[in-house]
Image: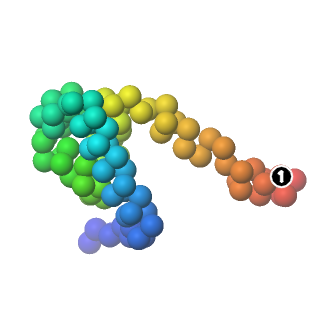
Amino acid sequence: MKKQNVLYPKAAKALLTLGENLRLARKRRKITAGMMAERANLSLMTLRSIERGSPHVAMCNYMAVIACLGFLDDVAAVAANDVLGRNLQDAAL
């Protein structure tokens, strides 16, 4: 039996926000859903799931949309400034 992953409410909300932000960024750039799906090499249904913040879509598909919109540097910055982690590391020394 396959293990079910748990998505906590705060993470689910962040995913919904990400999907909405990606949809708005696409629309601001005047890119149709069909064009975005083609550029990201996704089906239109997968793109729609991403824009709805579905947790059932693979991260690589989210990354394809993020790359097409030009936000890869923003993703690379996630956890780059890990203040808590550095403080914990320093405390263990």
Residue depicted at 41% across the width and 58% down the height: 14
| Foreground pick, 37 / 91 | 37
Task: Tell me if residue 76 comes above or below residue 20 in the rendering.
Answer: above
Residue 29, percent from left and from top: 27, 30
Task: Tell me if residue 68 comes above or below residue 87 in the rendering.
Answer: above
Residue depicted at 21% across the width and 30% down the height: 30
Q: Amino acid at mark 1?
A: Asp
Residue depicted at 54% across the width and 44% down the height: 78
Residue 37, percent from left and from top: 17, 35
Tally of numbered tags: 1
Q: Relative to residue 38, is residue 9 drawn left or right?
A: right
Q: Relative to residue 19, is residue 36 drawn left or right?
A: left
Residue 52, percent from left and from top: 24, 55
Q: Relative to residue 74, is residue 53 drawn left or right?
A: left
Residue depicted at 12% across the width and 42% down the height: 44
Q: Is residue 41 visible?
A: no
Residue extending farthest right: 93
**Dot 1, how many residues are within 10 Å of its Cα: few (below 14), some (14-19), or many (20+)?**
few
Task: Tell me if residue 41 comes above or below residue 56 in the rendering.
Answer: above
Q: Disc 1 on helix, strand or loop?
A: helix
The residue identified by callout 1 is 90
